[in-house]
Amino acid sequence: MPRVRSHVRFHRHTYRDRDWYVLQDHSNGRFHRFSPEAYLIIGLMDGKHTLHDIWKTACERLDDDMPTQDEVIDLLSYLHQSDILQSDTLPDFKDLHRRGRKEKMSRWLAMLRSPAYMNFSLLDPDKFLEKTLFFVRPLFSPVGLILWLAIVSFALVQVGIHWRELTSNVADRVLSLQNLFVLGLIYPVTRIFHEFGHAYAVKRWGGEVHEMGLMLVTFMPLPYMDASSSSAFESKWRRIVVSAAGIMADLLLASLGMIVWINAEQGMVRAVAYNIMLIGGVSTLLLNGNPLLRFDAYYILSDFLEIPNLADRGNKYIGYLLQRYLFGVREAKSPVQAKGEEPWLFLYAVLAFFYRVFISITIVLFIAGRFFFIGVILALWTMGAILIFPLIKMGRYVAQNMRRSLSRVLMIAGVFAGFLAGFLFLLPIPSFTVVQGVVWAPEDSRIFAATDGFVLKLLATPSSRVSKGDPLFICEVPELRAEVNVLQAGLKEQEARYRRSFVTNIAEAQVIRESMSSARAKLARAEEKFGEMVVRSPVSGILLIPKADDLPGSYVRKGMPVGYVVDFSKTIIRVVVNQVDVDHIRNRTRKVTGRFAASLDKVYPARIEREVPGASKELPGMALSPEGGGGVVLDPKETEKPQSFEKLFHFDISLDQAKARGIGERVYVRFEHDSEPLAFRFYRSIRRVMLKRFGI
């Protein structure tokens, strides 16, 4: 005669207007959810009724809602495996030992499947929380919520006021060696406040917290507390508050850090406050505030939608769809339990899978960029967790539960694998490379100052057409004018002396004549420099002078670029190409087109004019940087002259039938190549990442 163990309690929950019963096992902290029909059957297990009596009574009470015999057997098996049932028969110690070993093995396998996330339990904080709850209880009240909103709102206003100061040069400030050390010390402390927020929220409504320990996130130790007892709360809003308490604690710390930051002087206190803001305001929202990861926001979303076990049931729903509609298994059971759950289960399972792959790859690349060997091991480990383990699990499931349809499953899987391989490796797909460039002025179209001096006035109107040799502007060099006057006066004096000496002293006249030759040479050189004060157009075209109104009266140095004379009937674009794509563009380009960023609807035919020899970090224009709307990442170490983070190859492209609006205008250039399968494009993308991260 089966009987439910004394350490379990039932709690009634309502999900989507339907009652469910949550069983809380106080011996191990686990929770199990049952339907009303299963709850009635479990309730009859009081140690006084045999299984026959329980079956008979349940049939009478449930009538048409009575589960099938196989479903009741599955329920009994589940209760037995979960150590919820006991009976008057002697326990099977071998079975208990086997289940204990299986449970330990499953915990280790779970850690192996998630190498970046591991938990280690250390102590039981429940008594400490019980004794200190008095101090924080007022925070879990309407007054506490209003106070929290006031502090956070004030901090948000201050963030808006000081936004530019907060975000300027943020990469150098955060990634400096000194700041990384401070960040490493502060982050675990802020996590303690986060976890205690969850724990006190659980205690506020009578829950228990019996586990506290360390969680390794990308091998960084962080504290954690097990607040799963909140699953017993009947009110979904209380469960949501427990899940949100950690985020609220982080935002409160970030807000207090903002208040300290705006009032503190430059120094360690201000740096610590800035890091607390960064952790609480940015890191927390990206990690705990992301529902696609099984952290706080996931449980908030699950309770708000009233879909328990959203992630697991979403994966089961995808499996059901594959079995039912791909493999044709009519006996497949849907995990959907209420109307309206289908789109949420499907959408969450798909988005969470791709995000998990993305975040795993990001973590692997981040670690491998600093510790290559560890990164390679972690990459293989992650690949096993994401691909190999699920495939093994799927294979076992197929072998155990789909034996009748095994041949059909293998045939469909083979066809699908063949189709996928053909699609990736055989089917030609249009291939192209899109890069960015700027309207470029040829070297012979640039206007340079011919001498040092002040610009006296403009002789040509900016944006007007000029011809080669036309005067553009004149420079004033008072010292040079005075030098010419002095040389001219000196030459006249020597000529007068020469005429006088030629009559009276032939020898002296000969000496003066040689001196006159030297004076004439000096005067010729001075007059040549004086003539260079008038700057003339190097070619015919449109005169472009940036800030032309500010040019008169300004001082220029010899060789300094002042403007351009451009013939826009032939537009030249200088594009930048990364190291991975340059060979593809050189050897496999069959068509080139261009679009101006300001008018993407117009496509112009183009052709490659020339390639600038060698790679360079210099940018053709700031329009290619993120500040100008481009995608070329700048090197944060270069503060004097902006340069790209990696070396790039430059190509000059001519656009036919296109008229640019000005030098430096951003342009998208598309190089079309021969069609190729997707696998080769994936290979180049992976190679690009390898070159960028590791130089291999």
Image (spheres, helix red, strand yellow):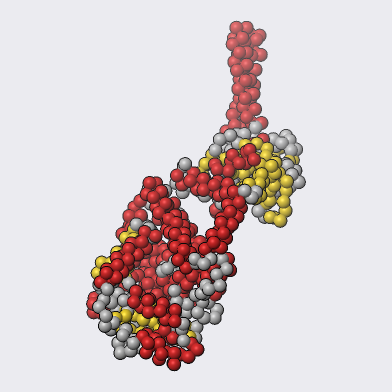
Q: Is residue 406 above or below residue 127?
A: above
Return the x and y of residue 474 as percentages of the image width and height: 66, 38
Q: Which corner quadrant holds the N terminus?
A: bottom left
Residue 265 in which image quadrant: bottom left
Residue 226 in which image quadrant: bottom left
> Residue furthest toward the bottom?
60
Say whether residue 460 is left or right of residue 302: right
Instruction: Look at 32% across and 60% down and name the residue there.
Output: 221
Say whether residue 38 is left or right of residue 101: right
Residue 529 in which image quadrant: top right
Q: Nearer the viewer, residue 307 or 694?
A: 307
Say whether residue 224 is left or right of residue 539: left
Instruction: Look at 48% across and 58% down and name the residue there.
Output: 358
Instruction: Look at 36% across and 85% down and name the residue there.
Output: 51
Instruction: Look at 59% across and 29% down and name the residue there.
Output: 483
Count the labels in the image: 0
Return the x and y of residue 94 as percentages of the image width and height: 27, 69
Q: Is residue 410 above or below residue 665?
A: below
Q: Nearer the viewer, residue 75 or 362?
A: 75
Q: Nearer the viewer, residue 435 or 533?
A: 435
